[in-house]
Amino acid sequence: MNTSHAPLEAAQRESDLSLARLIIVSNREPYEHRLVKNHLIWERTSGGLVSALDPMMRRLGGTWIAWGSGKADRDVVDQDMTVEVPPDAPTYRLRRVWLESGEIKGGYQGYANQVLWPLCHLTLDRVDYRKLYWHAYQAMNARFAEVVLGELQMKPGFVWVHDFHLALLPGMVKASLPKQPVAMFWHIPWPGPDAFRILPERREVLESLLTCDLLMFQTQSFLHCFVECAKEFLGADLHADDGHLEYKGHATRVVSRPISIGFQTWSERAQSPQVTRSMDVLRNLHVFQPEVRIGLGVDRLDYTKGLLKRLWAIDAFFQQFPQYRGRFTFIQIAVPTRGDVEAYRRYRELIRETVNDINMRYSSISNPGSSHASRWRPVEFREGRIGLDTLAAYYRMADLALVSSVYDGMNLVAKEYVASQVDEKGVLLVSHMAGAAEEMTDALVINPYDPEGVAESIRQALEMPLQERRERMHRMRSYLAAHDIRAWADECLRDAGILPPHDSPSFE
């Protein structure tokens, strides 16, 4: 790794210049390229991180450094491994990092997704630790560090690192450039000391994060857990009056900044003619009788989303309240993820089996043998990716949305549902283990480990008076309109000193 950065260190002394350019670093890239029938195509990647940061980068410009995971990503970059994005209307640079197969398998799939992910989501029985994963994770972070340092040598900027894949990156950058401004946003939960002590490399991870100048978490609860870990395992001192942790003479400011969505974009999309038409198509696809009420779940096929427990709750609902058989259908949108990890493949099969079992026991056919015959199934399971207009149609038509994560940093599905509820008739049910529960205070808060309790909450949502539903939804929509993704980005950038103080206008 090249550590000769004399020109950069000279530029760093001019602090205003060092903040003039934003450099985002994440594992996931915002756009990827691939070949389809020998035609080069591009598409925007999915996920909350990209949804949050891409609009900000379009607005402010700068450079986004990420793993080039698309099959044709190499075909479109220049000699600096960069491409201007969005491809149809470029506003910022995407600089791609190329990972070796061992780094992908051991660092990304192994340490990040089979160690840190289940550990931070408190699914400890799923932690699959291997020492070779740690070495691959170090190598993966070092490869990112080399690219970041090379980018800084070309032109100074403020480095903003995102998420658990790159926990070692801040320390590596600071080791070469101690004065380089670095911030980190930790998108997933942070566990308390009792769980975090399981990680053999807990000190190394904590020490890297405490080289940051600014460290951000989704909620105050996760921030508190991190502080407790830093104090217990490193002996770091917390200066509560100004929200700083001090370790080895360096002060790290720690803040909670709940991530959000583009409220206006979702709200306007939900009212569009194409979404209105899609609602009729989807209702006819899943539910034949117009009086049937609809529940909705939208999740990646990830065990942290609590899909299996949710299905148990649906089963309990039809057992406890048989009067809703034939009158309520739950639609589950399941988006494939991490299909190369065996634990996820097994989980997907178990979900499919459970859906089939529930449907076999409760499904019915009305008016059999006649021209008016129609079927009813308690669970409609749709696996695969869907377009945003289709998703908005599902959100708008659903009488209730069920978010039953066993642990979640935020869960933007809860916010997307609220933003799409332009008729203000739906009810949000959200797990108290999801960060969204701390903000969506007019939702019905559920315990995903209590299927009978969740079943009762579903009944409560279905029988809630229309006026109460509208009042609750209106308050949540008003909150989201004021705390949208633009407000989140601006607050983060003010924390970093990139934007002026709060009473100044944000960038247009």
Image (cartoon, helix red, strand yellow):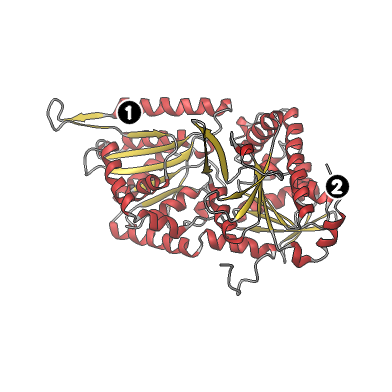
Closer to us: 3 or 173: 3
Q: Which residue is mark 1?
A: 359
Residue in view at x 36 percent, y 38 percent = 331
Disc 1 residue type (three-letter): Asn
Q: Does residue 139 appear to the left or right of 309 in the view shown?
A: right
Q: Quadrant of the N terminus?
A: top right
Please indicate, yes or no, whether residue 193 appears anywhere in the rendered image.
Answer: yes
Using the image as rendered, state which of residue 401 and residue 60 is in the foreground. 60
**Mark 1 residue element:** helix
In the foreground, 215 or 198: 215
The image quadrant of residue 378 is top left
Labels 2 & 1 near each other (Cβ < 8 A): no
Residue 2's label in the rendered image is none
Residue 124 appears in which quarter of the rendering?
Answer: top right
Q: Residues within 10 Å of mark 1 (few under 14, many from 20)?
A: some
**Image position, residue 413 (x, y; %):** 46, 48
Question: How many neighbours does mark 2 have within 10 angstroms: few (below 14), some (14-19), or many (20 or more)?
Answer: few
Q: Which residue is mark 2?
A: 3
Question: Of residues 323 and 310, which is closer to you in this image?
Answer: 310
Q: Is residue 50 left or right of residue 309?
A: right
Q: Residue at x 78, y 65 (%)?
A: 15
Q: How many marks?
A: 2
Give the residue furthest to the left.
370
Q: Position of residue 375 (x, y in %)?
A: 23, 31
Which is more N-terminal, label 1 or label 2?
Answer: 2
